[in-house]
Image (cartoon, helix red, strand yellow):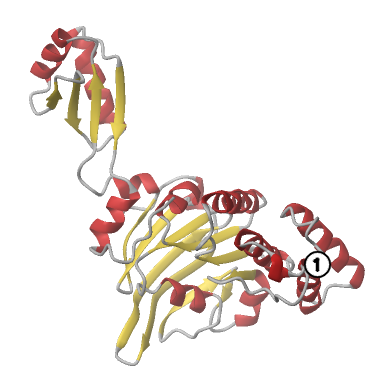
Amino acid sequence: MTTTPTAGPLAEAPPAISAVGLRKSYGDKVVLDGVDLRIPEGTVFALLGPNGAGKTTTVEILSTLVTPDGGEAQVAGCDLAGRPEGVRDAIGVTGQFAAVDNLLTAEENLLLMADLNHLPRRASRERVTALLERFELTEAARKPVSTFSGGMRRKLDLAMTLVGRPRIIFLDEPTTGLDPRSRRTMWEIIRGLVADGVTIFLTTQYLEEADQLADRIAVLDRGRIVAEGTAEELKRLIPGGHIRLRFPDAAQLDAAAAHFTASARDDETLTLRIASDGDLPALRAVLDVLDGAGLRAESLTLHTPDLDDVFLTLTGRSDSLKEAS
């Protein structure tokens, strides 16, 4: 079950990442079973899936760390098989665990990355200073990383990824283990990167994270993409959406219930629940009926299934789903 790609600027933008038929197996275990992707430049793409669905393997293949068994992919205009060095020059990767050296300070970690990127001494100093300021690590710049909190370590890890100014960044579960405040700080950093034109490939099990950040979301299960679309498109795949109308008195509720015969009413709260997928024609039809009958609702609220419902329905597994704080 997949959604139709959205028309508009996102669909028209050139792809930062594209893949057709990616496959990967380890022995008898099929990890990826024909994955297709198209991710426009300057967007956030979120890949959701249970543990073992193939999310990390997808990142490893697209970042040239692992060779696929089949399929084709282009990253930053470079063929994965033919020009892996071009892919590496264009990307940055932040894994599930912060890849920082605890024996060094934050500044020393960043300078090490600048050396690895062959930046001239003056340019590396300027870049490190700018990143320390951007990630609010200036005061802790000369403290050993071993004294850092989890949120500070994740910020430093991402700052190290940015030393080489990558056009595409792979974030593999970047906020795992962070408290809600640190997670939201990381979200703001990600939004800032996209505003600068960076493309983000995000894997996560925090459904709120995908809902908040992603322009498009794909759900990966047992090595296959089982659905893809915007958050709202995915929510509309799952039944259970409805429009809820609240009326000022019982007489108005009675009259409305007579017009919406398939609705469910709650006399205690003076509300009427009408099954709907929440699209504009459905909303307009409800409003037209109210207007034609001379009825006035005090409030109209739209309720759609959330990404938790999407995830559980499409993957059929709840054991590996994390609660979003």
Dividing the picture into quarters, in which one does residue 75 lie?
bottom right
Which residue sits furthest front? 147
Q: Does residue 44 appear left or right of residue 55 in this picture?
A: right
- From this viewpoint, is residue 23 visible? yes
Query: Which residue type carries mark 1?
Result: Glu
- From this viewpoint, is residue 165 visible? no
Q: Which residue is mark 1?
A: 107
Which residue sits furthest bottom? 27
Q: Position of residue 72 (x, y in %)?
A: 45, 78
Q: How many marks?
A: 1
Q: Position of residue 81 (x, y in %)?
A: 53, 83
> Which residue occupies the foreground of this view, 90 or 257?
257
| Disc 1 packing (10 Å; few <14; some 14–19; many ≥20) | many
Q: Does residue 131 appear left or right of residue 166 in this picture?
A: right
Residue occupying image coordinates x 20% and y 10%: 292
> Is residue 296 positioned above or below 19 on the image?
above
Q: Secondary structure at mark 1?
A: helix
> Is residue 248 positioned above or below 179 on the image?
above
Q: Position of residue 90 (x, y in %)?
A: 65, 70
Residue occupying image coordinates x 25% and y 60%: 314
